[in-house]
Image (cartoon, grey):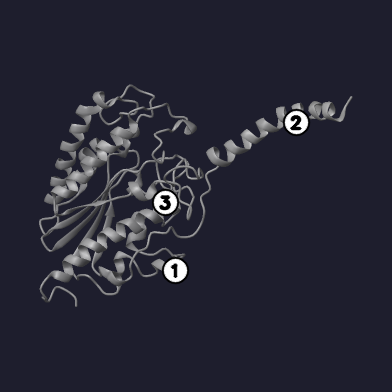
Amino acid sequence: MTRRRKLRRWLLPLALVGLPALALAFFWQFQLRRPIGEGPVAIPVPAAPFSKPWTDRQVLLVGLGDSVTAGFGASPGKSYFERIIANPPDEFNDLMGLCLSRVLPNLSATNLAMSGTTSQQHLRAEIPKLVRQPTHVLGLVVFTTGGNDLIHNYGRTPPSDGAMYGASFEQARPWVATFAHRLETMLDAIRAAFPGGCHIFLANIYDPSDGTGSLRWVGLPAWPDGLKLLAAYNEILSTAADRHPDVHLVDIHEPFLGHGLSCAQFWRVHYDRQDPHYWYHVNVEDPNDRGYDALRRLFLNAIATHVARETAQLPHQSTWLD
């Protein structure tokens, strides 16, 4: 037997074993492996707005919405709601002293958000718990709503309003319109609870698929119109913020792209070379600690932009700090 024939005899079994092993390694590295990383996320929070108090008014911070605001999956003390109030003991150097308790000396807080809730439940069960405040109280409301309307019931039941996973866009069109009306009703009710004024910080909805629309690797069925309906909900949230001067959109959709199920796939358009890591909890719906750090930074920037600016523009009076 010639050397060439012997080589062929070895190459075939090597290929039969090696190619599947290579494919399996590729699949693990770029599809199943989702590294979390460590340290702060690269969303800067300017220190200047936190260098002096904003107001000595009584301020009530309220959390409303779903598990994102309830803090599901966060380590103790590291939900975004807790971290915008006060720095945790192991705070990152770049955020030391950058929190609301530093600039709002008369701040109190209550978190009414409940994990697993939809916008229907926010209107029916959460907002009625918001007690009407005296006129001297300024309201700051952080609100995440609509995400569970889209993802429930994970394709296990026929799509419906508040549980539309798997619906076609045409089928869901009336539910989208209902969400827009429901959102306006909720914003009116929140506003009515603060006759002394409020700021509502309304988050849009992130996309764990990183723009691919595919959640099959976490066991969910295909949903051809999923991204289209997500965009429709985000448009409603954005339009509400544009319509009302006391409602401010907190864009979490764009910063989270590249940190979902495709975070390790360098060929994706949203791949983040500086931080190619997973910002979601094991349930894929909620953030992990680094994701909550990102949310904390995004909410802090939005609050500082609107609240610090407003108080700085008010004429001097005894109730406002220099």
Q: Position of residue 95 (x, y in %)?
A: 39, 66
Residue nearest the viewer, comparing 151 with 272: 272
Pointer 1 and pointer 2: residues touching (CB < 8 Å)? no
Which is nearer the N-term, disc 3 or disc 1? 1
Q: Position of residue 82 (x, y in %)?
A: 35, 57
How packed is label 1: few (under 14 Cα within 10 Å), some, or many (20 or more)? few
Figure check: 322 above or below 146? below
Give the residue number, with chain letter if any, for mark 3: 291
CA distance for labels 3 and 2: 43 Å
Query: Three-letter amino acid code at disc 1?
Result: Asn
Give the residue number, with chain letter if any, for mark 1: 93
The answer to whether residue 57 is visible is: no
**Left or right: 97 in relation to 233:** right
The image quarter containing residue 224 is top left
**Left or right: 76 in relation to 56:** right
Figure check: 106 above or below 23? below
Image quadrant containing the C terminus? bottom left
**Left or right: 44 in relation to 123:** right
Q: Position of residue 138 (x, y in %)?
A: 17, 61
Query: Three-letter amino acid code at disc 2?
Result: Leu
Query: Three-letter amino acid code at disc 3?
Result: Gly
CA distance for labels 1 and 2: 52 Å
What secondary structure is found at the residue carrying circle 3? helix
Question: Which mark, residue 113?
Answer: none
Give the residue number, with chain letter if any, for mark 2: 14
